[in-house]
Image: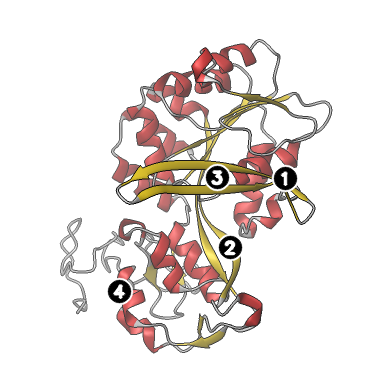
Amino acid sequence: MAKAGHTIDLRVSSLPTQHGEKVVARILDHSRALLSLSALGFSSDDSGTVAGWLKRRTGIILVTGPTGSGKTTTLYAMINAIREDRINIVTVEDPIEYSIPGINQVQVHPEIGLTFARALRAILRQDPNVILIGEIRDGETAEIAFRAAMTGHLVLSTLHTNDAPATIARLIDLGVPRYLVAAQTTGVLAQRLVRALCPACRVQGRPPVSHLLQLNLPAAWCDDPTWWLPVGCDACGETGYQGRISLFETLVPARTLREQIGAGASEHELRTSAVRSGMVSLLTDGLAKARAGLTTVEELGRVLESEESAVTLCDACRHVTPPGYAFCPFCGERTAGTCGGCGHALLGTWTHCPACGHQRRTVPG
């Protein structure tokens, strides 16, 4: 199908409803160039982390998030960053969304028995260096993927989870042995897509308190006039937004986290450990981008769930700080939401520390 000289594909889903057919069409523009990693919106730290993952020869890299969050685009950008003649890269996808020169791409056909699992078994006999799996949907595919990583392959794939730490629990639920998850997980990247503020008409101002409360952020933040807000102009069709950017949460399994995975730690324990080892949450990344004028608090509330909203704000320097830490990484002051006695993280309504019994100096109102 041609449009303005471009070849595009349409993925069409039709559903019979009470008052007629409901149709959703997904447009795949083949004239669009593959994105580079630098164009995805990574912070400098995350960019270096992902680049380090892609230099490895073994292990599995997982990109997680809901449908439509840009996972496939991120995988393609990763493949685009490492493809070269001497690297044998094979993909198995459903469907193949974009044709990539120099890459061996396989389309699954479940109706003839060519499933992800069967395609993977065949691919492993093709001497691949890198394997891209469009999506891990079942335990069989998950275990083959992890055993491929264990036997000298770099594997990239996607999974549907809310955040990066939940991915570990999901893999174990699928039946992947804990020792494989602990040993072979190179990194997990959770992401969301939000609308980007129009640079031509954005203005600074105070966000509505309702937008802050939706994310469990302090209502007092609405007194700050330096947030960015949408306006609307001809350039953005009067919407105030133009294009989209990604929010990222990058989990790098450190030694302590790998030991916890192998020992059967809970999802909450894994999340706490990940934060303490430096993981920046989706909301923290989003707030940094909202502060920079790239998006808005309203957009963060549209795409993030409340349980993804645990952040703290330094009372001294007003920087958004990673949750779970006792001191602000920007000014060195003790952060709000931590115990003054032992540094244990405290929930907003707690008056005493459950770890040491220390009484909070001020009770959150």
Q: Secondary structure at mark 4?
A: helix
Q: How is the image coloured?
A: secondary structure
* Image depth: mark 2 or mark 1 in front: 1
Q: Earlier in the sequence, mark 3 or mark 1?
A: 1
Q: Earlier in the sequence, mark 3 or mark 4?
A: 3
Q: Secondary structure at mark 3?
A: helix
Q: Which residue is mark 2?
A: 244
Q: Earlier in the sequence, mark 2 or mark 1?
A: 1
* Image depth: mark 2 or mark 4 in front: 2
| Marks 2 and 4, how far apart at CA | 24 Å
Q: Which residue is mark 4?
A: 213
- Mark 1, Cα crowd under 10 Å, few <14 / some 14-19 / many 20+, is some
Q: Secondary structure at mark 1?
A: loop
Q: Is residue 260 visible?
A: no
The residue nearer to you, when weighing 363 against 199, is 199
| Marks 4 and 1, how far apart at CA | 41 Å
User: Which residue type carries mark 2?
Assistant: Arg
* Image depth: mark 3 or mark 4 in front: 3
Q: Earlier in the sequence, mark 4 or mark 1?
A: 1
Q: Which residue is mark 3?
A: 71
Q: Earlier in the sequence, mark 3 or mark 2?
A: 3
* Image depth: mark 4 or mark 1 in front: 1
| Marks 3 and 1, how far apart at CA | 17 Å
Residue 30's label in the rendered image is 1
User: Is 138 on the left-hand or right-hand side of 40?
Assistant: left
User: Which residue type carries mark 3?
Assistant: Lys
User: Is 279 on the left-hand or right-hand side of 241?
Assistant: left
